[in-house]
Image (tube, grey):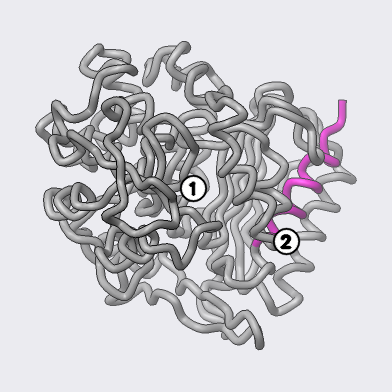
Amino acid sequence: MEQGNGGFSATGLRRLRDVLTRHVESGRIPGLVALFSRGEETHVEAIGTMRHDGGAPMSRDTIFRMASTSKPVSVAAAMVLLDECRLRLDDPVQEWLPELADRRVLKRFDGPLDDTVPARRPITVRDLLTSTFGLGMDMTSLGTPIMNAVFEQGLTPNLPVPVPEPDEWMRRLGELPLMHQPGERWQYHISNDLLGVLVARVTGRPFETFLRERVFDPLGMKDTGFHVPADQIDRLPTLYAPDPQTGEFLVWDEAEGGRWSRPPAFAGGGGGLVSTADDYHAYFRMLLNGGKHGGERILSRPAVELMTTDRLTPEQNAARKAMATENVHISHGQGQHGGWGFGMAVRTYRGDYAPIGQFGWDGGSGTASYADPANRLTGILLTQVGASTPDSMRLVHDFWTTLYQAIDD
């Protein structure tokens, strides 16, 4: 590891490494890769192993399931289309997504699915980008008829059944009413998957193909995609979802023959990406650099500013605040952000060591990626322990605390 001289103190870097090592030595985190940079100075820590019972060591090029940390990256495809005026923020999406025309909206979000009123207006591109189109993963409404229907229809990942291909997914989504009027409330996840379908229909290309050509390839993100090729599968660790009661390491997904070992029927922008620390670093550094990578412009500066500043009214944000503060063991991170841009959280008040303006997101597979314009700081932490227990989320929290205490200027 390089010595601190470009804005990190040597003492602070040692403390960061010690804290990360302590998490691995606790036996609760088999391994991790942390990459962080400030200005031109970059550090990488790869600690522990690919399996909880040993196996190959973690390395800088280990490939991880990014889960919801996919959201800030996949949204770039839609921003490319905004830059090119192939989409406009206030265009109704039904031109490309006719399944979403003439929406019905539940009278009560927890009411029967046939007790509805007409939507007051069409769903727009802006509604999808801000996650306010009227339907989403509402963790505070589990057990309601609409949430049960979302699960029964296989509209979200992580269920025993795979998500269907995009046209069938849209057909099923189009049969459900909305929980809230378009533009009314922030709701999690489904809009991010919907954006991928929108991009594919506007461009006439598969979502992954467009993302690769316009975002991944220009940034050199060679290990980012929606599955891991067979000749690279040994770089993907086992993913664990520990038993919440006993902490026993339960396998949630194996590398060989697992969910990411072959191309999915549905390339989910909300949680489907696999990637590496260096690939994500390239992407978040591009955002910090106002949309440029080297001499190449990936996104316009205004597009990046739209993505990475708060887009929500207090009324829209009510559901997000409830999710953040009522899911206790993930709340330390999510609860401190305040706002939401396009596909990512944006800090609007100072709730911990990170300043206002920091942007990024976390993933339920034990991943986190944020950038901080005020400090020219990027941090990526990747592990293979899902958020079924607090362990990986506490590791993420401690990574950010020690990263910020290592700043020295």
Question: Which one is earlier in the sequence, the residue at label 2 or at label 1?
Answer: 1
How far apart in space, not on screen, are marks 2 and 1 (Cα)?
17 Å
User: Please, is residue 398 above or below residue 187 in the view?
Assistant: below
Residue 238 visible (yes or no): yes
Looking at the image, residue 221 sits to the left or right of residue 289; the answer is: left
User: Please, is residue 287 above or below residue 242 in the view?
Assistant: above
Residue ID for mark 1: 69
Q: Toward the viewer: 195 or 225? A: 195
Give the amino acid at mark 2: Arg
Residue 63 visible (yes or no): no
Q: Can you give x and y, in whole percent of width and height, for residue 82 in the image?
A: 31, 17
* Residue at screen point 38% across, 40% down: 134
Asked if the magenta segment contains residue 157, the reply would be no
Q: Secondary structure at mark 1?
A: helix
Check disc 1: other Cα within 10 Å, few if <14, some if 14-19, many if 20+: many
Q: Toward the viewer: 314 or 333? A: 314
Q: Can you give x and y, in whole percent of width and height, for residue 27 in the image?
A: 70, 79
Q: Secondary structure at mark 2?
A: helix
Looking at the image, residue 369 sits to the left or right of residue 408; the answer is: left
Residue ID for mark 2: 394
* Residue at screen point 60% across, 39% down: 318
Q: Which residues are magenta?
A: 393-409
* Residue at screen point 36% across, 72% down: 255
Give the amino acid at mark 1: Thr
- Name the quadrant containing residue 207: top left
Mark 2 and mark 1 residues within 8 Å of each other at the beta carbon: no
Q: Toward the viewer: 121 or 94? A: 121
